[in-house]
Image (spheres, rainbow, N blue to C red):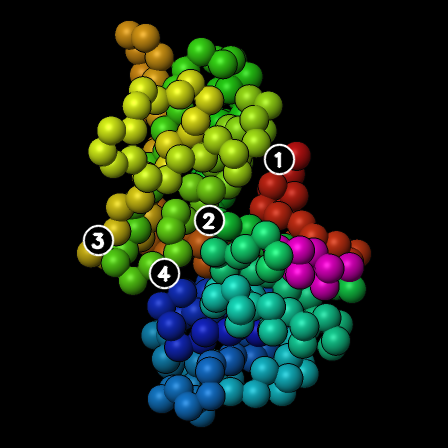
Amino acid sequence: MIKIAVTGAAGRMGGRIITAIKEAEGLELAGAAERPGHAMVGQDAGLVAGCGPLGVNISDDLEQVLSGADVLIDFTFPEVTLKNLEICARLGCKMVIGSTGFTPDQREGVARLARKIPVVLAPNMSVGVNACFKLLKEAVQILGDGFDVEIVELHHNKKKDAPSGTAVRMGEVVADALGRDYNECAVFHREGMTGERTHEEIGMQTVRGGDIVGEHTVYFIGMGERIEITHRAMSRDMFARGSVRAAHWLDGKTPGLYDMQDVLGLK
């Protein structure tokens, strides 16, 4: 039985992860953490998640939460995630990270700490999205350099980072397959007399509103034809199931930084 701890246990994502752990075979919820002062601290994590009592109370002491855990699943924010990762590295607890919005320096910090413990870091835990990453690479290999590329992503109005980590990863996959540097060719804003679109740029467009879980479309636009690869998330359950799958996959792995392409055997 693999024992899992969850941060942000009283949030929407945390609740779906706790439910996914309860429904999965071979996994057990060992701990649930929230920030100090949260109203749900001390409550049964299963009741808060809506999946029934689990006998695990939400705590604001992460070290105590990790004392009986094999893996921590963390969907918080980069600054919080790095602090949690430092604790995991010190205690020898594996970690699955679904947080997005990391700066290059923060990603280097994750990679450094992953030398001590196995870590899965992915901008999107969905199996379908990771299949799209592979399809995008194959599409570029077929289409070559003859199509303009635009990426549009939509999310709910509470999302704090833009563009989404998934959209950025899609841009990186396409740019790498085309032999370009994503950081040099990504264009995030167009207004006024911008001049003609360059062939090398990859447009990154962001939409925020309502309760959209997540939608990403990559457009390959040629002369007289257009190809669209789209993924739409209907609920957070797919992210939760993917993170639980990653936690299970980490069992027996050596220290290092992995992603969902590793977990799904797509590399």
- The amino acid type found where label 1 is placed reads Leu
Q: Are marks 2 and 3 in contact (CB under 8 Å)?
A: no
Residue drawn at 40 percent across, 65 percent down = 13
Q: Which residue is mark 2?
A: 165
Local secondary structure at mark 4: loop
Q: Is residue 251 left or right of residue 10?
A: right
Which of disc 3 and disc 4 is earlier in sequence?
Answer: 4
Q: Residues within 10 Å of mark 4 (few under 14, many from 20)?
A: few
Q: Label 3, label 1: how many angstroms apart (C-alpha)?
A: 33 Å
Which of disc 4 and disc 2 is earlier in sequence?
Answer: 4
Which of disc 1 and disc 2 is earlier in sequence?
Answer: 2
- The amino acid type found where label 3 is placed reads Gly
Q: Are marks 4 and 3 in contact (CB under 8 Å)?
A: no
Q: Which residue is mark 4?
A: 160
- Tally of numbered discs: 4
- Which numbered dot is residue 226? none
Quarter of the image containing the N terminus?
A: bottom right
Which of disc 3 and disc 2 is earlier in sequence?
Answer: 2
Q: Which residue is mark 1?
A: 266
